[in-house]
Amino acid sequence: MASTYLSKSHKFIIHNLKSKNYLMFGFINLSSSVTNSLFSPHLVLRTISPNLSNSSRINPSITFSGGFASVSGGRRFHNATSFSKDVDQLSNEVPSQQELNFPGGKVKFTRKRIFTSGSNDERTQCYRVLSENGQLIGGSDSLEISKELAIKMYKEMVTLQVMDIIFYEAQRQGRISFYLTTNGEEAINIASAAALNNNDFVFPQYREPGVLLWRGFTLQEFANQLFGNKYDYGKGRQMPIHYGSKKHNYITVSSTVATQIPHAVGAAYSMKMEKQDSCTITYFGDGGTSTGDFHAGLNFSAVMEVPVIFFCRNNGWAISTPINDQFRSDGIVVRGKAYGIPSIRVDGNDALAIYSAVYEARKMAIEKQTPILIEALTYRAGHHSTSDDSTKYRPIDEIEWWRDDQNPVKRFKTWVMNKGWWSDEAELEHRSSIRKQLSQAIQAAERVEKPPVTDMFNDVYDVPTKNLNEQEVFLRKTIKKYAQEYPSNVVV
Protein backbone atom coordinates (compact mmCIF):
# COMPACT_ATOMS: atom_id res chain seq x y z
CA MET A 1 0.00 0.00 0.00
CA ALA A 2 2.86 2.28 0.86
CA SER A 3 4.34 1.75 -2.57
CA THR A 4 1.01 2.62 -4.14
CA TYR A 5 0.91 5.98 -2.33
CA LEU A 6 4.52 6.57 -3.24
CA SER A 7 3.88 5.91 -6.88
CA LYS A 8 0.89 8.28 -6.88
CA SER A 9 2.87 10.95 -5.06
CA HIS A 10 5.74 10.63 -7.47
CA LYS A 11 3.38 11.17 -10.39
CA PHE A 12 1.84 14.18 -8.61
CA ILE A 13 5.24 15.80 -8.14
CA ILE A 14 6.18 15.19 -11.76
CA HIS A 15 2.94 16.88 -12.77
CA ASN A 16 3.59 19.86 -10.52
CA LEU A 17 7.15 20.25 -11.68
CA LYS A 18 5.87 20.61 -15.23
CA SER A 19 3.18 23.05 -14.09
CA LYS A 20 3.75 26.82 -14.25
CA ASN A 21 2.25 27.18 -10.80
CA TYR A 22 4.51 24.85 -8.88
CA LEU A 23 6.51 26.12 -5.96
CA MET A 24 9.19 24.06 -4.18
CA PHE A 25 10.01 24.80 -0.58
CA GLY A 26 13.00 22.47 -0.53
CA PHE A 27 14.35 19.32 1.00
CA ILE A 28 14.68 18.51 4.66
CA ASN A 29 17.31 15.85 5.28
CA LEU A 30 15.94 13.49 7.83
CA SER A 31 17.52 10.18 8.72
CA SER A 32 14.46 8.59 10.26
CA SER A 33 12.63 6.11 8.13
CA VAL A 34 8.99 5.41 7.76
CA THR A 35 7.79 3.61 10.85
CA ASN A 36 4.13 3.64 11.68
CA SER A 37 2.87 5.75 8.80
CA LEU A 38 4.05 6.91 5.45
CA PHE A 39 2.57 10.30 6.36
CA SER A 40 4.98 11.00 9.18
CA PRO A 41 5.33 14.66 10.28
CA HIS A 42 9.05 14.40 9.37
CA LEU A 43 8.64 15.82 5.89
CA VAL A 44 11.42 16.05 3.37
CA LEU A 45 9.72 17.61 0.40
CA ARG A 46 6.62 19.66 -0.15
CA THR A 47 5.35 21.07 -3.41
CA ILE A 48 2.54 23.54 -3.15
CA SER A 49 0.25 24.92 -5.76
CA PRO A 50 -0.92 28.53 -5.27
CA ASN A 51 -4.40 27.30 -6.09
CA LEU A 52 -4.66 25.24 -2.92
CA SER A 53 -7.48 26.66 -0.85
CA ASN A 54 -6.06 25.59 2.51
CA SER A 55 -2.28 25.66 2.60
CA SER A 56 -2.19 24.76 6.29
CA ARG A 57 -3.42 21.24 5.62
CA ILE A 58 -0.95 18.57 4.60
CA ASN A 59 -1.92 16.62 1.52
CA PRO A 60 -0.87 12.98 1.99
CA SER A 61 -0.27 12.58 -1.70
CA ILE A 62 2.55 15.13 -1.69
CA THR A 63 4.40 14.25 1.53
CA PHE A 64 7.40 12.06 1.90
CA SER A 65 9.34 10.96 4.95
CA GLY A 66 12.69 9.45 5.77
CA GLY A 67 14.64 10.95 2.87
CA PHE A 68 12.97 8.42 0.53
CA ALA A 69 14.21 5.45 2.53
CA SER A 70 13.53 2.09 0.98
CA VAL A 71 9.89 1.10 1.07
CA SER A 72 9.14 -2.60 1.38
CA GLY A 73 6.77 -4.17 -0.97
CA GLY A 74 7.22 -1.73 -3.81
CA ARG A 75 8.10 -2.70 -7.31
CA ARG A 76 10.67 0.10 -7.65
CA PHE A 77 13.39 1.12 -5.23
CA HIS A 78 13.31 4.90 -4.61
CA ASN A 79 15.88 6.93 -2.73
CA ALA A 80 16.95 10.60 -2.51
CA THR A 81 19.61 10.20 -5.18
CA SER A 82 17.40 8.70 -7.84
CA PHE A 83 14.61 11.19 -7.20
CA SER A 84 17.06 14.10 -7.38
CA LYS A 85 18.08 12.92 -10.86
CA ASP A 86 14.44 12.91 -11.90
CA VAL A 87 14.03 16.48 -10.66
CA ASP A 88 17.21 17.64 -12.42
CA GLN A 89 16.10 16.10 -15.66
CA LEU A 90 12.71 17.73 -15.46
CA SER A 91 14.09 21.12 -14.45
CA ASN A 92 16.12 21.23 -17.66
CA GLU A 93 12.98 20.64 -19.65
CA VAL A 94 11.05 23.50 -18.01
CA PRO A 95 11.63 26.83 -19.86
CA SER A 96 13.09 29.50 -17.55
CA GLN A 97 11.40 32.84 -17.00
CA GLN A 98 12.71 35.34 -19.57
CA GLU A 99 12.04 38.61 -17.74
CA LEU A 100 11.04 40.01 -14.38
CA ASN A 101 8.10 42.37 -14.11
CA PHE A 102 9.79 44.65 -11.60
CA PRO A 103 8.53 48.08 -10.45
CA GLY A 104 9.61 50.56 -13.12
CA GLY A 105 9.42 48.13 -16.02
CA LYS A 106 10.29 44.62 -17.17
CA VAL A 107 13.88 43.45 -16.70
CA LYS A 108 15.28 40.73 -18.96
CA PHE A 109 17.33 37.93 -17.49
CA THR A 110 20.66 36.73 -18.81
CA ARG A 111 22.77 33.68 -18.09
CA LYS A 112 25.93 35.74 -18.51
CA ARG A 113 27.63 37.31 -15.52
CA ILE A 114 28.13 40.76 -17.05
CA PHE A 115 29.11 43.96 -15.29
CA THR A 116 28.26 47.27 -16.91
CA SER A 117 31.34 48.96 -18.28
CA GLY A 118 32.88 51.92 -16.49
CA SER A 119 34.92 52.79 -19.55
CA ASN A 120 34.49 56.04 -21.48
CA ASP A 121 36.00 54.65 -24.69
CA GLU A 122 32.80 55.41 -26.59
CA ARG A 123 31.91 58.91 -25.46
CA THR A 124 28.53 60.54 -26.01
CA GLN A 125 28.47 62.55 -29.22
CA CYS A 126 28.28 66.34 -29.18
CA TYR A 127 25.61 68.16 -31.18
CA ARG A 128 27.09 70.82 -33.49
CA VAL A 129 25.72 72.98 -36.31
CA LEU A 130 28.54 75.47 -37.05
CA SER A 131 32.12 74.39 -37.63
CA GLU A 132 35.07 76.22 -36.06
CA ASN A 133 35.33 78.48 -39.10
CA GLY A 134 31.67 79.47 -38.95
CA GLN A 135 30.45 77.29 -41.79
CA LEU A 136 27.09 75.53 -41.60
CA ILE A 137 27.60 71.78 -41.39
CA GLY A 138 25.64 70.01 -44.11
CA GLY A 139 22.66 67.95 -42.98
CA SER A 140 22.56 69.56 -39.56
CA ASP A 141 19.37 69.08 -37.60
CA SER A 142 18.87 72.72 -36.62
CA LEU A 143 16.17 75.35 -36.50
CA GLU A 144 15.98 78.19 -38.98
CA ILE A 145 16.41 81.61 -37.41
CA SER A 146 15.47 84.91 -38.99
CA LYS A 147 17.81 87.73 -39.92
CA GLU A 148 16.42 89.92 -37.14
CA LEU A 149 16.94 87.25 -34.49
CA ALA A 150 20.44 86.41 -35.71
CA ILE A 151 21.54 90.06 -35.67
CA LYS A 152 20.10 90.62 -32.21
CA MET A 153 21.85 87.52 -30.91
CA TYR A 154 25.18 88.62 -32.30
CA LYS A 155 24.86 92.22 -31.07
CA GLU A 156 24.06 91.01 -27.56
CA MET A 157 27.03 88.63 -27.63
CA VAL A 158 29.26 91.59 -28.53
CA THR A 159 27.62 93.75 -25.85
CA LEU A 160 28.31 91.06 -23.24
CA GLN A 161 31.90 90.77 -24.40
CA VAL A 162 32.52 94.53 -24.23
CA MET A 163 30.70 94.79 -20.89
CA ASP A 164 33.05 92.20 -19.41
CA ILE A 165 36.11 94.08 -20.62
CA ILE A 166 35.00 97.45 -19.23
CA PHE A 167 33.74 96.19 -15.87
CA TYR A 168 36.82 93.99 -15.42
CA GLU A 169 39.02 97.03 -15.97
CA ALA A 170 36.89 99.03 -13.51
CA GLN A 171 37.65 96.44 -10.84
CA ARG A 172 41.35 96.57 -11.61
CA GLN A 173 41.15 100.34 -11.15
CA GLY A 174 39.66 99.84 -7.70
CA ARG A 175 36.29 101.29 -8.61
CA ILE A 176 34.38 98.09 -7.78
CA SER A 177 35.43 95.32 -5.42
CA PHE A 178 34.85 92.18 -7.49
CA TYR A 179 33.95 90.92 -10.95
CA LEU A 180 33.95 87.80 -13.10
CA THR A 181 33.56 87.45 -16.85
CA THR A 182 31.79 85.18 -19.31
CA ASN A 183 34.76 85.04 -21.72
CA GLY A 184 34.29 82.02 -23.98
CA GLU A 185 30.73 81.43 -22.86
CA GLU A 186 28.91 84.25 -24.65
CA ALA A 187 27.04 81.84 -26.94
CA ILE A 188 25.71 79.87 -23.98
CA ASN A 189 24.36 83.05 -22.40
CA ILE A 190 22.71 84.67 -25.39
CA ALA A 191 21.64 81.71 -27.51
CA SER A 192 19.98 79.90 -24.62
CA ALA A 193 18.19 83.09 -23.55
CA ALA A 194 16.93 83.63 -27.10
CA ALA A 195 15.33 80.17 -27.10
CA LEU A 196 13.35 80.82 -23.91
CA ASN A 197 10.23 82.85 -23.20
CA ASN A 198 10.27 85.74 -20.76
CA ASN A 199 7.73 83.97 -18.55
CA ASP A 200 10.22 81.15 -17.97
CA PHE A 201 11.99 81.53 -14.64
CA VAL A 202 15.78 81.61 -14.63
CA PHE A 203 17.81 80.26 -11.71
CA PRO A 204 21.38 81.28 -12.59
CA GLN A 205 24.75 80.51 -11.14
CA TYR A 206 26.90 83.64 -11.57
CA ARG A 207 28.19 83.39 -15.15
CA GLU A 208 24.91 84.05 -16.96
CA PRO A 209 24.44 87.86 -17.01
CA GLY A 210 23.83 87.57 -20.75
CA VAL A 211 20.47 85.93 -20.06
CA LEU A 212 19.46 88.99 -18.05
CA LEU A 213 20.91 91.28 -20.71
CA TRP A 214 18.79 89.56 -23.36
CA ARG A 215 15.64 90.10 -21.31
CA GLY A 216 16.15 93.85 -21.15
CA PHE A 217 18.28 94.51 -18.07
CA THR A 218 20.04 97.77 -18.94
CA LEU A 219 23.73 98.56 -18.70
CA GLN A 220 22.86 101.15 -16.06
CA GLU A 221 21.11 98.50 -13.97
CA PHE A 222 24.19 96.29 -14.21
CA ALA A 223 26.38 99.18 -13.09
CA ASN A 224 24.07 100.05 -10.18
CA GLN A 225 24.37 96.51 -8.84
CA LEU A 226 28.14 96.39 -9.24
CA PHE A 227 28.57 99.68 -7.36
CA GLY A 228 25.92 98.78 -4.77
CA ASN A 229 24.20 102.15 -4.84
CA LYS A 230 20.67 102.96 -3.70
CA TYR A 231 19.25 101.93 -7.07
CA ASP A 232 20.61 98.43 -6.73
CA TYR A 233 17.62 96.07 -6.40
CA GLY A 234 19.54 94.14 -3.77
CA LYS A 235 20.00 97.33 -1.71
CA GLY A 236 23.75 96.87 -1.70
CA ARG A 237 23.59 93.69 0.35
CA GLN A 238 25.04 91.39 -2.29
CA MET A 239 28.58 91.35 -3.62
CA PRO A 240 29.06 92.48 -7.26
CA ILE A 241 27.74 90.37 -10.17
CA HIS A 242 25.01 88.85 -7.96
CA TYR A 243 22.23 90.22 -10.14
CA GLY A 244 18.52 89.63 -9.74
CA SER A 245 15.36 90.99 -11.32
CA LYS A 246 11.78 90.27 -10.36
CA LYS A 247 10.63 92.05 -13.52
CA HIS A 248 12.60 89.67 -15.73
CA ASN A 249 11.96 86.47 -13.74
CA TYR A 250 15.65 86.19 -13.00
CA ILE A 251 16.20 84.86 -9.48
CA THR A 252 19.01 86.60 -7.58
CA VAL A 253 22.41 84.95 -7.87
CA SER A 254 23.67 83.08 -4.83
CA SER A 255 27.37 82.46 -4.22
CA THR A 256 26.71 79.06 -2.69
CA VAL A 257 27.39 76.46 -5.38
CA ALA A 258 24.39 74.60 -6.84
CA THR A 259 21.77 75.74 -4.32
CA GLN A 260 19.77 77.11 -7.25
CA ILE A 261 19.19 73.61 -8.66
CA PRO A 262 16.59 72.33 -6.15
CA HIS A 263 15.04 75.81 -6.13
CA ALA A 264 14.46 75.57 -9.89
CA VAL A 265 12.95 72.11 -9.49
CA GLY A 266 10.55 73.31 -6.78
CA ALA A 267 9.44 76.27 -8.90
CA ALA A 268 8.89 73.96 -11.87
CA TYR A 269 6.77 71.68 -9.70
CA SER A 270 4.65 74.69 -8.79
CA MET A 271 4.24 75.55 -12.48
CA LYS A 272 3.13 72.00 -13.16
CA MET A 273 0.48 72.11 -10.43
CA GLU A 274 -0.80 75.44 -11.73
CA LYS A 275 -0.71 74.13 -15.33
CA GLN A 276 1.35 77.06 -16.57
CA ASP A 277 2.64 77.20 -20.13
CA SER A 278 6.20 77.79 -18.98
CA CYS A 279 9.22 76.10 -17.46
CA THR A 280 12.26 76.89 -15.36
CA ILE A 281 15.90 76.72 -16.35
CA THR A 282 18.85 76.51 -14.03
CA TYR A 283 22.47 77.06 -14.99
CA PHE A 284 25.49 75.59 -13.22
CA GLY A 285 29.06 74.62 -13.90
CA ASP A 286 30.72 71.23 -13.91
CA GLY A 287 31.75 71.82 -10.30
CA GLY A 288 28.10 72.12 -9.30
CA THR A 289 27.47 68.53 -10.39
CA SER A 290 29.71 67.35 -7.56
CA THR A 291 27.21 68.60 -4.98
CA GLY A 292 24.33 66.78 -3.34
CA ASP A 293 21.89 69.43 -4.54
CA PHE A 294 22.56 68.43 -8.14
CA HIS A 295 21.69 64.78 -7.59
CA ALA A 296 18.72 65.52 -5.35
CA GLY A 297 17.39 68.02 -7.88
CA LEU A 298 17.64 65.64 -10.82
CA ASN A 299 16.06 62.74 -8.99
CA PHE A 300 13.15 64.80 -7.62
CA SER A 301 12.47 66.36 -11.03
CA ALA A 302 12.44 62.96 -12.75
CA VAL A 303 10.15 61.32 -10.21
CA MET A 304 7.73 64.26 -10.09
CA GLU A 305 8.00 64.87 -13.86
CA VAL A 306 8.44 68.63 -13.71
CA PRO A 307 9.23 71.05 -16.58
CA VAL A 308 12.78 72.14 -15.77
CA ILE A 309 15.87 72.48 -17.95
CA PHE A 310 19.19 71.67 -16.31
CA PHE A 311 21.88 73.55 -18.22
CA CYS A 312 25.41 72.53 -17.31
CA ARG A 313 28.24 74.74 -18.54
CA ASN A 314 31.02 72.18 -18.58
CA ASN A 315 33.95 74.56 -19.08
CA GLY A 316 36.54 72.10 -17.84
CA TRP A 317 37.42 73.83 -14.60
CA ALA A 318 35.79 74.34 -11.19
CA ILE A 319 37.98 77.32 -10.34
CA SER A 320 41.36 75.51 -10.26
CA THR A 321 40.01 71.94 -10.16
CA PRO A 322 39.98 70.18 -13.56
CA ILE A 323 37.16 67.82 -14.45
CA ASN A 324 39.52 64.83 -14.31
CA ASP A 325 39.82 65.43 -10.57
CA GLN A 326 36.06 65.72 -10.16
CA PHE A 327 34.59 62.63 -11.81
CA ARG A 328 35.37 59.60 -13.96
CA SER A 329 32.10 59.53 -15.90
CA ASP A 330 31.73 60.67 -19.50
CA GLY A 331 31.07 64.24 -18.47
CA ILE A 332 27.62 65.22 -17.22
CA VAL A 333 25.26 64.09 -19.96
CA VAL A 334 25.40 60.41 -18.94
CA ARG A 335 24.04 61.27 -15.52
CA GLY A 336 20.72 62.24 -17.04
CA LYS A 337 20.09 58.69 -18.24
CA ALA A 338 20.90 57.36 -14.77
CA TYR A 339 18.02 59.44 -13.41
CA GLY A 340 15.68 58.77 -16.33
CA ILE A 341 16.01 62.25 -17.82
CA PRO A 342 16.26 63.00 -21.58
CA SER A 343 19.68 64.52 -22.15
CA ILE A 344 21.86 66.02 -24.86
CA ARG A 345 25.46 67.13 -25.22
CA VAL A 346 25.97 70.28 -27.28
CA ASP A 347 28.88 72.37 -28.51
CA GLY A 348 28.86 75.27 -26.07
CA ASN A 349 30.67 77.54 -28.52
CA ASP A 350 28.10 77.05 -31.27
CA ALA A 351 25.27 79.58 -30.94
CA LEU A 352 23.03 77.86 -33.47
CA ALA A 353 23.39 74.46 -31.81
CA ILE A 354 22.64 75.91 -28.39
CA TYR A 355 19.60 77.79 -29.65
CA SER A 356 18.17 74.68 -31.33
CA ALA A 357 18.86 72.44 -28.32
CA VAL A 358 17.32 74.79 -25.76
CA TYR A 359 14.34 75.60 -27.97
CA GLU A 360 13.52 71.91 -28.37
CA ALA A 361 14.26 71.22 -24.69
CA ARG A 362 11.77 73.88 -23.63
CA LYS A 363 9.14 72.44 -25.94
CA MET A 364 9.66 68.93 -24.58
CA ALA A 365 9.70 70.09 -20.96
CA ILE A 366 6.33 71.84 -21.25
CA GLU A 367 4.49 69.51 -23.61
CA LYS A 368 5.70 66.25 -22.05
CA GLN A 369 6.11 67.57 -18.50
CA THR A 370 9.61 66.24 -18.18
CA PRO A 371 12.99 67.54 -17.02
CA ILE A 372 15.77 67.91 -19.62
CA LEU A 373 19.53 67.88 -19.06
CA ILE A 374 21.82 69.83 -21.41
CA GLU A 375 25.58 69.59 -21.15
CA ALA A 376 27.39 72.34 -23.08
CA LEU A 377 31.06 71.65 -23.72
CA THR A 378 32.90 74.96 -23.57
CA TYR A 379 35.93 76.59 -21.94
CA ARG A 380 36.36 79.37 -19.43
CA ALA A 381 38.64 81.58 -21.51
CA GLY A 382 39.16 84.06 -18.68
CA HIS A 383 40.15 83.79 -15.06
CA HIS A 384 37.56 82.41 -12.66
CA SER A 385 37.18 85.90 -11.22
CA THR A 386 39.22 88.99 -10.41
CA SER A 387 40.46 87.06 -7.37
CA ASP A 388 42.00 84.35 -9.53
CA ASP A 389 45.02 83.90 -11.81
CA SER A 390 44.29 80.84 -13.93
CA THR A 391 47.76 80.85 -15.51
CA LYS A 392 48.98 79.36 -12.22
CA TYR A 393 47.19 76.10 -12.94
CA ARG A 394 46.48 76.16 -16.72
CA PRO A 395 48.90 76.35 -19.66
CA ILE A 396 48.75 79.74 -21.36
CA ASP A 397 48.81 78.16 -24.82
CA GLU A 398 45.73 76.11 -23.89
CA ILE A 399 43.87 79.26 -22.88
CA GLU A 400 44.89 81.06 -26.06
CA TRP A 401 43.83 78.15 -28.29
CA TRP A 402 40.31 78.17 -26.86
CA ARG A 403 40.16 81.98 -26.86
CA ASP A 404 41.08 82.21 -30.55
CA ASP A 405 40.28 78.98 -32.42
CA GLN A 406 37.11 78.16 -30.49
CA ASN A 407 35.87 81.71 -29.90
CA PRO A 408 32.04 81.57 -30.02
CA VAL A 409 31.63 85.26 -30.89
CA LYS A 410 34.03 85.04 -33.81
CA ARG A 411 32.40 81.85 -35.08
CA PHE A 412 28.90 83.32 -35.05
CA LYS A 413 30.14 86.57 -36.60
CA THR A 414 31.54 84.65 -39.55
CA TRP A 415 28.21 82.98 -40.12
CA VAL A 416 26.10 86.17 -39.99
CA MET A 417 28.60 87.97 -42.26
CA ASN A 418 28.52 85.13 -44.77
CA LYS A 419 24.75 85.51 -44.80
CA GLY A 420 25.22 89.18 -45.67
CA TRP A 421 23.53 90.31 -42.46
CA TRP A 422 26.50 92.03 -40.81
CA SER A 423 29.50 94.13 -41.78
CA ASP A 424 32.75 95.47 -40.34
CA GLU A 425 31.25 98.96 -40.30
CA ALA A 426 28.29 97.78 -38.24
CA GLU A 427 30.71 95.99 -35.91
CA LEU A 428 32.80 99.09 -35.29
CA GLU A 429 29.75 101.27 -34.74
CA HIS A 430 28.14 98.85 -32.28
CA ARG A 431 31.26 98.29 -30.19
CA SER A 432 31.92 102.02 -30.00
CA SER A 433 28.35 102.69 -28.91
CA ILE A 434 28.46 100.06 -26.16
CA ARG A 435 31.75 101.39 -24.78
CA LYS A 436 30.28 104.88 -24.61
CA GLN A 437 27.12 103.66 -22.87
CA LEU A 438 29.15 101.69 -20.33
CA SER A 439 31.39 104.64 -19.56
CA GLN A 440 28.35 106.79 -18.89
CA ALA A 441 26.70 104.06 -16.80
CA ILE A 442 29.78 103.67 -14.60
CA GLN A 443 30.10 107.40 -14.00
CA ALA A 444 26.43 107.70 -13.15
CA ALA A 445 26.51 104.70 -10.78
CA GLU A 446 29.52 106.12 -8.94
CA ARG A 447 27.76 109.42 -8.26
CA VAL A 448 24.67 107.85 -6.75
CA GLU A 449 24.70 107.60 -2.95
CA LYS A 450 24.80 104.28 -1.19
CA PRO A 451 21.70 102.68 0.34
CA PRO A 452 20.85 103.98 3.82
CA VAL A 453 22.35 102.10 6.76
CA THR A 454 18.85 101.11 7.81
CA ASP A 455 18.60 98.79 4.79
CA MET A 456 21.18 96.51 6.40
CA PHE A 457 18.75 95.65 9.15
CA ASN A 458 15.30 95.56 7.55
CA ASP A 459 13.42 93.08 5.28
CA VAL A 460 14.07 90.16 7.63
CA TYR A 461 11.81 90.66 10.63
CA ASP A 462 8.48 92.46 10.57
CA VAL A 463 9.55 94.19 13.78
CA PRO A 464 13.35 94.39 14.21
CA THR A 465 14.61 92.49 17.22
CA LYS A 466 16.34 94.13 20.17
CA ASN A 467 19.80 92.90 19.22
CA LEU A 468 19.41 94.20 15.65
CA ASN A 469 18.44 97.63 16.95
CA GLU A 470 21.50 97.62 19.18
CA GLN A 471 23.74 96.65 16.26
CA GLU A 472 22.33 99.45 14.12
CA VAL A 473 23.02 102.04 16.81
CA PHE A 474 26.55 100.73 17.24
CA LEU A 475 27.23 100.84 13.48
CA ARG A 476 26.04 104.44 13.16
CA LYS A 477 28.37 105.49 15.98
CA THR A 478 31.27 103.64 14.33
CA ILE A 479 30.69 105.32 10.94
CA LYS A 480 30.63 108.75 12.53
CA LYS A 481 33.75 108.04 14.59
CA TYR A 482 35.76 106.63 11.67
CA ALA A 483 34.18 108.57 8.82
CA GLN A 484 37.40 108.53 6.79
CA GLU A 485 37.15 104.74 6.50
CA TYR A 486 33.71 104.79 4.89
CA PRO A 487 32.45 106.13 1.53
CA SER A 488 31.40 109.74 1.79
CA ASN A 489 28.03 109.01 0.20
CA VAL A 490 26.86 106.55 2.87
CA VAL A 491 23.58 107.76 4.33
CA VAL A 492 23.87 107.48 8.11
Image (spheres, rainbow, N blue to C red):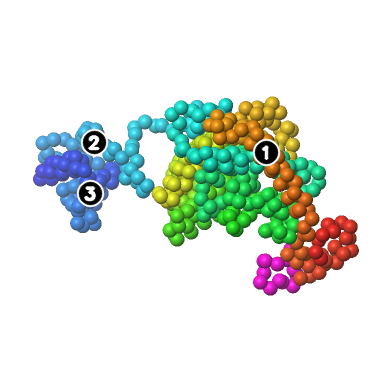
C-alpha distance separating marks 3 and 2: 19 Å
Q: Badge 3: few (under 14), some or many (20 or more) residues near its Cα, within 10 Å? A: some
Name the residue at 19% across, 40% down. 18
Residue 291 is left or right of residue 179, and the answer is left
Q: Position of residue 313 (x, y in %)?
A: 58, 40
Q: Can residue 384 be seen in this view?
A: no
Q: Residue tagged by mark 1? A: 429
Question: In which image quadrant can residue 67 be found?
Answer: top left
Residue 223 against residue 327 in the figure, above or below = below
Residue 35 is left or right of residue 491, and the answer is left
Q: Residue tagged by mark 3? A: 48
Residue 264 is left or right of residue 447, and the answer is left
Q: Give the residue type that dot 3 points to.
A: Ile
Earlier sequence position, callout 3 versus callout 1: 3
Q: Residue tagged by mark 2? A: 95
Q: Where is residue 281 in the image (x, y as percent from the top left)?
A: 53, 49
